[in-house]
Image: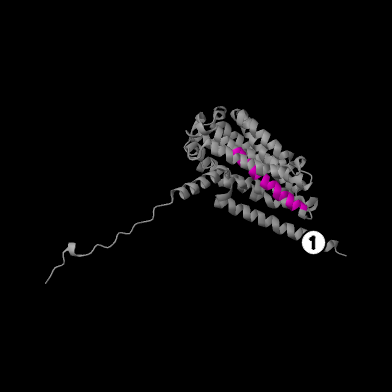
Amino acid sequence: MHVVESADVPESPQRTEPAPDRPAEARSNLIADLAGLIRPSHTAKAILLVPVALIGTRPWSVAALAGIISATIAFILAAAVVYIGNDIADRDRDRHHPVKRHRPIASGRVGVPCALLFAGVLLVLLGAIVIRSPAAYWPLLVYLALNVAYSRRLKHIPLVDVGTVAAGFVLRVVQGYEVTGGQVPAWLLITVFSMSLLLLLGKRRQELLDGGAAHRPALSGYSMELTNWLLQIASVLSLVSGLMYLRDEGPFGPQHGQTAMMLSTPFALFALFRYLQIQLVDEGGGDPVRVLLRDRVMVANSMLWAATLGVMFLVTHSAFLVNAAP
């Protein structure tokens, strides 16, 4: 019997994997990093706040909807430019932060010239929207000016830093009312401002736990005890002002506003309790957007709350239409 030696067996041709397309891979990574610069998850701020003006607008018109869409896009672009500017200014400090050091500019994946060019393109797109009606976009222009002051000086002043950022949330709401022509409800602005403070103070508290004042100089003016007290004050103001908005200025009118306030009280209290639990027990309030949009308990409570008020809105307005019919 002839034993076939290994040398007698013809070698099968080796499969050669195609070399990766390095330029294409680099372009893909760059696009992903540029997208990360504008904080895609934070677009929820504009998407949720600017269209609030539609709640008090009846009936909706094509002009009002178009104005809200344009204002929302404009604020997304403006916020993206602000984020890029802050990342450029804070790149040295961010390199010492356990999380922020992975950001595209701080990590060196995106160079400063490239980031500036990207911000310039976004500014051109923003200008194309604002130039059509500059007077109607004064809240957005104030927002940009406020953030320039914030980046240069205000972010280093304790308490003023969170107030400045909270004012940006209020300006988003005002912008929505500006393009729709509605009157801005005072209680709503107080609610948005106080809720923003609540989220920002929770973020400052988490930053104290993570790295102290080394990363953010303004943290030298905070302490765990102070932030705990301020969280309580902001929580109470958020609750009271939000319920007063529903009673006096909300979409249910004076006849049903009190009912809306009573139905909302358990949901509002639970939302605050859950947020404080995340802050004080779980110590997970470093990213407010993640807390509000990804915490299952918070999302479930919000959906039940919205469904309750939605059903009430349909019932009350259906009854109104029936009574108004000839």
Q: Residues within 10 Å of mark 1 (few under 14, many from 20)?
A: few
Q: Quadrant of residue 128?
A: top right
Q: Which residue is mark 1?
A: 319
Closer-to-camera residue (8/109): 8
Chain part drawn in magenta: 63-83
Q: How many marks?
A: 1
Q: Residue at (84%, 62%) from the top-left corner? A: 323
On the question of residue 325 being in view, the answer is yes
Q: Quadrant of residue 234?
A: top right
Q: Is residue 21 left or right of residue 312?
A: left
Q: Residue furthest right?
A: 326
Task: Please provide percent x and percent y for residue 267.
Answer: 64, 50
Task: Please provide percent x and percent y for residue 80.
Answer: 61, 42
Task: Quarter of the image for the C terminus: give it.
Answer: bottom right
Closer-to-camera residue (284/94): 94
Closer-to-camera residue (194/95): 95
Closer-to-camera residue (266/140): 140
- Magenta stretch, main secondary structure, is helix
Residue 69 is inside the magenta segment: yes
Q: Amino acid type of disc 1? A: Ala
Task: Please provide percent x and percent y for residue 209.
Answer: 50, 35
Q: Residue at (63%, 56%) from the top-left corner? A: 304
Q: Residue furthest left?
A: 1
Q: Tell me the element at label 1.
A: helix
Q: Relative to residue 161, is residue 285 depicted above or below?
A: below
Q: Residue at (52%, 44%) from the top-left corner? A: 33
On the question of residue 159 being in view, the answer is no
